[in-house]
Amino acid sequence: MKSIRTKLKLNNKQKTLLAQHAGYSRWCYNWGLSLWNAAYIDGYKPNPRKLREVFTNHTKPLYPWMKNLSSRVYQYAFLNLGEAFKRFFKGLGKYPKFKKKGRSDSFTIDNCGKPIELNGWSHKLPFIGIVKTYEPIEVTTKKITISRQAGDWYLSCSYEFHPTTTPKKTDVVGVDLGVKTLATLSDGKVFESVRSYRQFEAKLSRLQYLNRHKEIGSANWRAAQRKIARLHRKVANIRQDALHKLTTYLAKNHGRVVIEDLNVRGMLAGQKLAKAIADQGFYEIRRQLKYKCQWYGSELVVVDRFFPSSKTCSNCGHVQDMPLHLRTYDCPDCGVSIDRDLNASINLRNAVGSVVNACG
């Protein structure tokens, strides 16, 4: 399956309708969580199906305004609540919390088992009607999720995708991820860091400073919060664009992509480079490579994190300490002088035989 997410072009009436559906979903989710907690205390074992039956037969008739909204919304709200509890019991997430208005507003609908056709720039959605997008879409899906971020609404869905093996320019490529440059490949190609957060850090700090004395809940406070959210979204979009271009290039043009198993959590625990490392998105690169290599018929190879890629000479194999401030590897044995990141990427390419973990 492949997923897409695109921005919607809406008028005020449509925005109001989507906000009502998002509020409906939030209300049902919180109602279900409250009933789930009460039932669990009384010794019962609730599940989404029982919640739906109680809601349909006893609660929904008490609120006439719910008849004006899609009934699929509350069904998916209970399913999402059930999935949240499954993740909690498996140790994959925290105990579900009550949702708040304005935070992660979203809802999911389908076409009662029939496929939803998204063709071109305008799309007919179940119960919602005709909506427009800023880019053409040609997919067939079973359900769609509409969410709000920084005051704008987005449509997301998944659809069947058939992987295709693309022609490869290189059999094996080593990729060294860094802070100075986003990625250095063993063939010498360098992807520069966009440093999106660093670009807008001063502006973001200024907006937060101006918002410090505004009354929470006032119109000025909401406007300021919207500006801050939009700037955060811009920072994230710039970073995501750079990461997608990098990972797509690697997966499409190389038979094997060799990266290092970085301890990102441990790196973020440091005080000096934590902000710069978080701005790069190392874990996101590995996550994208894992599924894109499957899409385009390549293999992702992950080398053990203790492999001395930066300390080893790529020419003769000599090992020496390399503090972070040294950007050039000067080998005392063979006399080679090479860029630190390029040397590490070449070592990763040559370390395919000592792979500890492989994903493909």
Image (cartoon, helix red, strand yellow):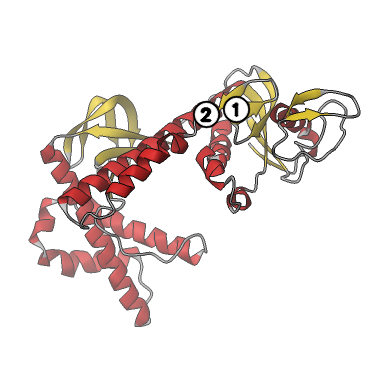
Specify few, some or many for label 1: CA neighbours under 10 Å numbering under 14, 14-19, or 20 or more.
many
In the picture provided, is 142 more to the left or to the right than 261?
left
Q: Residue 67: x percent and y percent?
A: 11, 55
Which amino acid lies under the numbered mark 2 shown in the image of this protein? Answer: Pro
If the image is split into quadrants, where does the C terminus sit?
A: top right
Read off the residue under disc 2: 163
Residue furthest to the right in view is: 333
Inspect the image, locate mark 1, and give the three-letter code of the amino acid beneath it.
Gly
Q: Does residue 25 appear in this view?
A: yes
Considering the numbered disc 2 on the image, is that residue within a helix, a strand or a loop? loop
Of labels 1 and 2, earlier in sequence is: 2
Q: Quadrant of residue 139?
A: top left
Numbered disc total: 2
Closer-to-camera residue (349/5) = 349
Q: Pointer 1 and pointer 2: residues touching (CB < 8 Å)?
A: yes
For residue 308, above or below residue 252: below
In the displayed structure, does residue 102 sit left or right of residue 158?
left
Residue 297 — which label?
1
Residue at the image position 54 percent from the left and 41 percent from the top:
276
Q: Nearer the viewer, residue 41 or 178?
A: 178
Q: Vertical placement of 42 versus 8: above or below?
A: below
Rendering coords of residue 93 (x, y %)? 47, 61
Q: Is residue 30 left or right of residue 314?
A: left
- Estimate the x, y position of residue 247 in percent, counting from the top left: 55, 30
- Identify the residue at horizontal 16%, vertical 50% (top origin): 219
Q: Is residue 144 visible?
A: no
